[in-house]
Structure formats: C-alpha cells, structure tokens
Amino acid sequence: MSRRKLYRIIIEAGAAALLIFVLVFFLGFRVTSVQVEGNSFYTDDQIKNMVINVPLAKNSILAGFINTEKSTKDASMIDSIRISRINRNTLLLQVEEKQMIGYIEFQGQCVNFDRQGIIQIITDAPLENVPKIEGIDVKEAVQGERLSGISRTKLNTILSVGKMLEKMENKPDRLGFNELNQLVMYYGDIEVRLGDDENMDEKINRLVGILPELEGMSGILHLENTTEDSESVVFDDSTQEEEVRQDQETDGENDQEDASGLEYSDGSDSADTKSRENG
C-alpha cells in the first residue's frame, strides 16, 4: 500500500470519527427537558426564559457555560441561578432568590428589604412569608437603595433578628417596637416580647423550641430577661385564663409548670417579668 493511500485512509477515518463525535455531542446531549427548583417569586417559565433562551442552552454540556448572572441582571429578586445536568438530556436550574427580612408600608405599598437593609422590590401586596415591620417610618423609599430616615438602632435590631429568622420555617406575621422601644413579634395570637438586644441569640433559640408547644394558643411569651442560665420562661396563657381562675378558687394555685420548662400564668404577670428558675 502506498504511503499516499495510507495517509488518505487515516484522514478519512479521522474525519469519520470527528463526524461521529459531533453527532453524538450535539444530538446525544440535546436538551429535551428543563427542571426548575428553589423559585417562589418567579414562575418556572419566567426562569427558563431568562436563562435558556440562548443557543448554548440547546446542549446540556455547553449550557454550563451560560453566564446566568448576566441573563438575570434585571431580575431584582434573583440572587443566583446554578445550572447542572440531571442526565445528558435534562437540565436543572437551581434558583437562589433574595431573602427579604421584612416590609414596611409606605404610601400604600409594601417596601421589601433584605438583610443589608436594601430595598429590593416595592409591591402592591405583601409577599408570602415576609413579615410586616411596625414602628418604623421612612420619608422616602427607592428601590436599590438602603432604608433611610429611621433610627439606626432600630434598623440594626431588625436586621440582626431578621438574619436569625431566615433559618426558621415559621416566620412571624409581624414585628415591631412597643412603647418601651423593645422588640415584639407576633405569631397569630401569640405575642413574643424580646426586650432589648442583649442575649438575642439565646432568646431566638428558646423561641424556636417553644413555638410548637404554643400552637393553637393565645397569650404573651416573655423572653425579655432570658439568658443561657434561664431554666424556664413565662407564658401568660389567655386561653387557659378561665381554667386557672377556677383552680385559684379551689386550691389557690396561680401557676402551673410543665416538664418542658415553660411556665404558664393567668396573665397577671407584668410585661417585664423575669424568667423564673427551678429551685
């Protein structure tokens, strides 16, 4: 066999292999399905239109090179989107939406802000699972700018507590400041009094453990003076007020304590009641 013929066979074999590779690459990894998860503010179709409306998205391997930050720069509620492959024909878009700490009412609208106090979006109606913030006022609200015109102390308290609440599935309905400028949160008919900023981590940790026990009840949970050494906290249970009154008539007992360290009272305790210690 001549050298020229050998070279020709090698070139033709290489071209055939390249053609097979191209066919496998573009046809075998052709995207036929796209799944979206982690989105709540935007629909699946909206996310897909933002990210995969480009030629690279037609191939599940090339899709990994899509600049999602550029394609979502106009989406105010998206923090990031990660593209991955479930299999050779299916893409997964994992959406990380910006978390809102809360919203305040301003000129009939809901001003939603994040953990840095930046106004991310202004809506006509409250967003799901975003608590209302009461007791603070602003003179103006501009999307993309930090909340201004309010007490720095109050804002820092809201942002600090808001970061702690991000990990909780059960967000408060609303929170704000009472006449003593102390933080108060509301879960349905449960009022949670947190006091000042001292030991706030411990107060929130106690709240996480206690809330399930208070389901369906109403009253005031006193966490104002909670510390690491506190063995119990006081809950003024208005749902059991009548029952406690009857107990008082029979045996003179004012309070009852359960095994969890949560003490129930008839509501006669003052708002700054200290956590009682088990002797």
Image: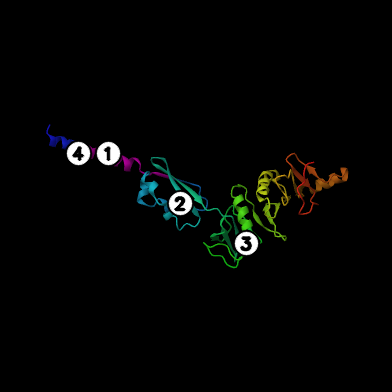
* Secondary structure state at the residue bearing disc 3: helix
Amino acid on which disc 2 is placed? Ile
Residue type at mark 4 is Ile
| The label number, if any, that marks residue 20 in the structure image | 1
Region rendered in magenta: 12-34
Q: Main secondary structure of the magenta part?
A: helix
Of marks 3 and 4, which one's residue comes earlier in the chain?
4
Number of the front mark, 4 or 2 = 4
Q: Is residue 239 above or below residue 28?
A: below
Q: CA separation, marks 1 and 3?
A: 65 Å
Q: Is residue 14 located in the magenta-colored stretch of the structure?
A: yes
Which of the marked residues, 4 or 2, is nearer the chain's N terminus?
Answer: 4
**Vertical order, 74 against 238 (above or below):** below
Residue that mark 3 sits on: 152
Q: Badge 4 is on which residue?
A: 11
Look at the image and name its color scheme: rainbow
